[in-house]
Amino acid sequence: MQEEITNGFVAVVKFIAYYIIWSVVLFNLGRASLLLVTLGRYPRGLDAQRNVNQISLVGILVLILAWSLVAIYNNTLGVHA
């Protein structure tokens, strides 16, 4: 009985973490990046609602790009400066 409650609690925490990270953080990072690159033309209105997963994927890519740039900077210039 206690194991089932624990599994249910873990499932709820995973869902909430997924929702917060994927639907809020990565979506807004991707949306801001796309708006910046397209000079405010995409995603607007219904495009933002229809393409939530694609916009969140752009957020992941921007996060990976930023992390990679920081790693490259630290390995080439940052440590030796």
Image (spheres, rainbow, N blue to C red):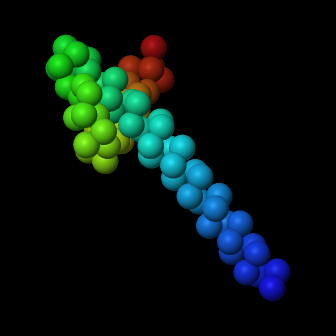
In this view, which residue lies farthest toward the right? 2
In what quadrant of the picture does the N terminus appear? bottom right
Residue 33: x and y in percent read 30, 25
**Image vertical order of residue 7 relative to residue 14, above or below:** below
In this view, which residue lies farthest toward the bottom? 1
In what quadrant of the picture does the C terminus appear? top left
Write the residue at 64% across / 62% down. Answer: 12
Residue 31: x and y in percent read 32, 29
Q: Is residue 57 left or right of residue 41?
A: right
Q: Is residue 50 left or right of residue 28?
A: left
Write the residue at 17% across / 19% down. Answer: 41
Residue 57: x and y in percent read 30, 44
Q: Nearer the viewer, residue 59 or 23?
A: 23
Write the residue at 40% across / 30% down. Answer: 28
Q: Quadrant of residue 38?
A: top left
Q: Is residue 18 left or right of residue 12?
A: left
Residue 32: x and y in percent read 34, 23
Q: Quadrant of residue 37?
A: top left
Q: Nearer the viewer, residue 57 or 51?
A: 51
Q: Quadrant of residue 62?
A: top left
**Residue 57 visible to an observer of this rendering:** no
**Residue 80 visible to an observer of this rendering:** yes
